[in-house]
Amino acid sequence: MNKKAVISPRARKSAILNVLQEQLIDSQEALVFALKRMGITVTQATASRDLLEIGAHRGKDEDGVMRYLAPTQAPAPPTSQSNKLLISAVASGNLLVLRTPPGGAQLLAGSLDHARITTLIGTIAGDDTVLAIASTAQGGARLKEEIEVFLGSPRVKSSTRKQTSTQSRIKKKK
């Protein structure tokens, strides 16, 4: 019978930090596999919890590669790339829909989730769209302003449209 050594949570988290600093870990599955090679068996749920507890997060490293970053590894500054990702923003109630170029939503959402924007509860990202949820019932517009400040970007295209001269003429005729 093969007995496995019991490892303390502190030692396991220390091993995770070492792995994150020495290897390119781009998923929780890759982390579980790397730990297994070291003789540490964990479930994906435990790895996920440990990553959260040590403050690791997904982001782009200095080479632009998406990976898990240890708390001491700083992601690329948000204004260097993230401000180029925001194409448009539309607020409705406590929701904010952010449009990005194809493939940009995950990066933008990750930057926002780690930005400590107080009015942001969280984000959900697809391929080119991020849904950001504000902490108050009508906080979408305020959240949009805070995200623009965070990104250092000029006002992006929003949902408010100016009337065209054709629209003005139609109203006058009625």
Image (cartoon, rainbow, N blue to C red):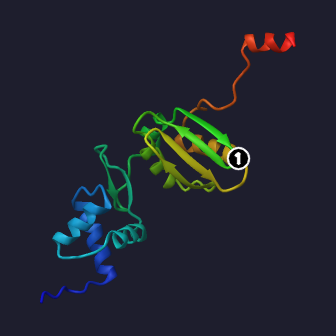
Find residue 166 and report its horizontal and vertical position in percent: 74, 10
Residue 112 visible in the snapshot: no
Counting labels gives 1
Counting from the top left corner in percent of width and height, residue 92 is at 68, 42
Q: Quadrant of residue 152?
A: top right
| Residue 16 x %, y % | 29, 69
- Disc 1 marks which residue? 93
Crowd around label 1: few <14 · some 14–19 · many ≥20 (10 Å): few
Left or right: residue 157 compared with residue 161: left
Q: Do we see residue 158 in this rendering? A: yes
Residue ID at (74%, 19%): 163
Please state, as top left, top right, bottom left or bottom right, where the N terminus lies in the image.
Answer: bottom left
Identify the residue at image location x=25%, y=61%.
Answer: 30
Q: Is residue 3 left or right of residue 92?
A: left
Q: Residue at x 61, y 52 (%)?
A: 133
Q: Quadrant of the C terminus?
A: top right
Residue placed farthest to the left in the image? 1
Vertical order, 113 against 172 (above or below): below
- Residue type at tag 1: Gly
Choose between 111 and 27: the one closer to the eye.
27
Check the image and report above or below for 42 versus 161.
below
Outermost residue to the front? 174
**Residue toward you, 76 or 92:** 92
Q: Is residue 82 above or below residue 15?
A: above
Task: Tell me the SS state at disc 1.
Answer: loop
Identify the residue at horizontal 28%, vertical 74% (top origin): 42
Measured as percent of width and height from the top left, residue 81 is found at: 42, 38
Q: Locate residue 123 relative to residue 9 in the image: left or right.
A: right
* Quarter of the image where one finds residue 119: bottom right
